[in-house]
Structures are given as structure tokens and as C-alpha cells.
Image: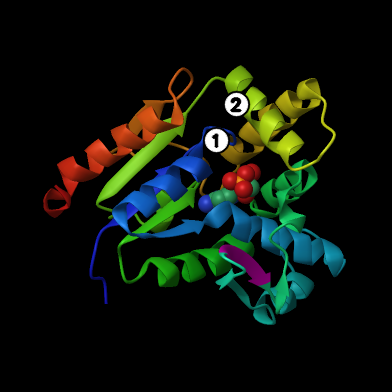
Amino acid sequence: MKQGPIVTIDGPSGSGKSTVARTVAERLGYRYIDTGAMYRGIGWLARREKVPFREGPELEALLESTRLSFEERDGRTALVVNGRDITDRIRTAEMGMVASDISAIGSVRKWLSVLQRTLGEEGETVLEGRDMGTVVFPDAEVKIFLTASLKERARRRTTELRQRGETVDPEGVQQDLAQRDFNDSRRELAPLRKAEDAVEIDTTSMTLAEVVDRVLAVVRERVPEKR
Ligand code: DC
């Protein structure tokens, strides 16, 4: 039973979705769900099990036998797939591309959408991704669409990957992001786009604190009891 509002935050890679969504959830006392991590998790598993990235009985069987969940472990939220904590393994640039590829497949989107709706069912949840406001939660009380210039997104992503210890070439990061933008917004199923009733925020020259404040202001506007 839904007991509270849903906040969706969609946008392209590197627009600041994860940090903003996590911080907004903390400030509101809501749960935070990173749906990109779910696509990364399925991509990681399919590749490990050598299941081809196309519709068919092998992929169906993989989805049917998979358990994917977020669990609190060692003071952080871990992505657990079939009992294995793969939180760190999915965070590479390569897994971002793998996730983008597998996310174009209908059966994968369907399977994950069902899980995402179950996770958001009780409300008081912030969900971040590409199609949260358009497809998965079209009736969400608050919808945000974050953007930033390609250059700024590449700069942020390069810093983030370096902090994780990856050796990265900024040019390559920018090309990867451009490729993912293309894949994610041109695909046939649930492409990345702003929901009509979403509030768009261009974060290019904003600080994290400014973006969070802006999102919280939209929440206060649309959810009167959160004043
Ligand atoms: O947010 P991210 O970079 O972790 O997402 C990885 C990929 O997963 C992204 O390139 C597209 C896909 N994705 C999606 O299709 N729908 C979502 N709701 C979230 C992610």
C-alpha cells in the first residue's frame, strides 16, 4: 500500500542524478533506489554467464532464476545478485556500456520495471534512472529531469572514475558518454526523455547543494505536507 510520495529523478549519464537523488532521499528521510545499478547488475550477470544480449530462451531463463536486491551491508547499500555483493564490480565505465546495451532489451526492461514498482510501492522513495517519470512511475508526485553539458558531464565522470582508482582518458570518457546518450535516447523502448510534467534542471554551472535545494523546493511545492 502506497503511504507516501514518489520522487523520480531521470537524466543522462553524469548529470548528477545519483549524488542528488541520494542526498535528497537522506534529507527527506526517504528510501533511495539507483535503477541504473539494477541494469548494470543484470548486464554483469548475463556477461558472466555468457548469455547473449538478445531476446530468447537463454535470457528468459537467466531472468527467471535471478534474485536481485539492495541490502544494507557494512554501512552501505549493496547490490546483491544471486547472493553475491557486486556493488564495486558494476561501477566501471565498461559496465556502464554493458548496462546501456542490455537495457535496450524488452524482457530485461519488463523484469526490472516490475521489481522497481515493487520497491517504490510503499512511497517515500526517490528513484533515479532514465524512465522513472515516463514509464515506471507515470503518476509520481514529483518528477525531476537533470541535464548538464556533455563536457561538464565528462569532467564529473572522469573525476568519479579516477576516485575509484580507474585509469581513464577524459577524451574516451566523453566519447563513451556521447555513445550512451545516443543509445539511451534513441532506443525504441522507454528511451531517455523528459516527462511532460517533469521539472528540468540544468546543473552545468550549479553546485550539488544548489541542485539539492532546487529539488527540495519542487518537493515542497508538489507535496504540501513536506513544508
Ligand atoms: O545510471 P547508470 O549510468 O548507472 O545506468 C546505466 C545504464 O542503464 C544506462 O546507460 C541506461 C540504463 N538504464 C536504463 O535504461 N533505465 C534506467 N531506469 C536506468 C538505467
User: Which residue lies under the disc numbered 1?
Assistant: 12
The reply to whether dot 1 and dot 2 touch (C-beta < 8 Å) is yes
Residue situated in front as seen by the camera: 78 or 181: 78
Residue situated in front as seen by the camera: 18 or 10: 18
Residue situated in front as seen by the camera: 204 or 190: 204
Q: Residue at x 43, y 69 (%)?
A: 119
Q: Is residue 206 above or below residue 89?
A: above
- Disc nearer the start of the sequence (1/2): 1
Residue situated in front as seen by the camera: 67 or 75: 75
Mark 1: which amino acid?
Answer: Pro
| 70 to the left or right of 160 | left
Q: Of the numbered discs in the image, which one, if any, rests on residue 153?
A: 2
Magenta stretch: includes residue 98:
no
Q: Residue at x 71, y 45 (%)?
A: 96
**Which range is magenta?**
76-80
Label 1, ligand 1: CB separation under 8 Å? no
Callout 1 secondary element: loop
Residue 106 visible from this viewpoint: no
Q: Residue at x 12, y 49 (%)?
A: 224
Q: Is residue 199 above or below residue 37?
A: above
- Dividing the picture into quadrants, the one containing residue 111 is bottom right
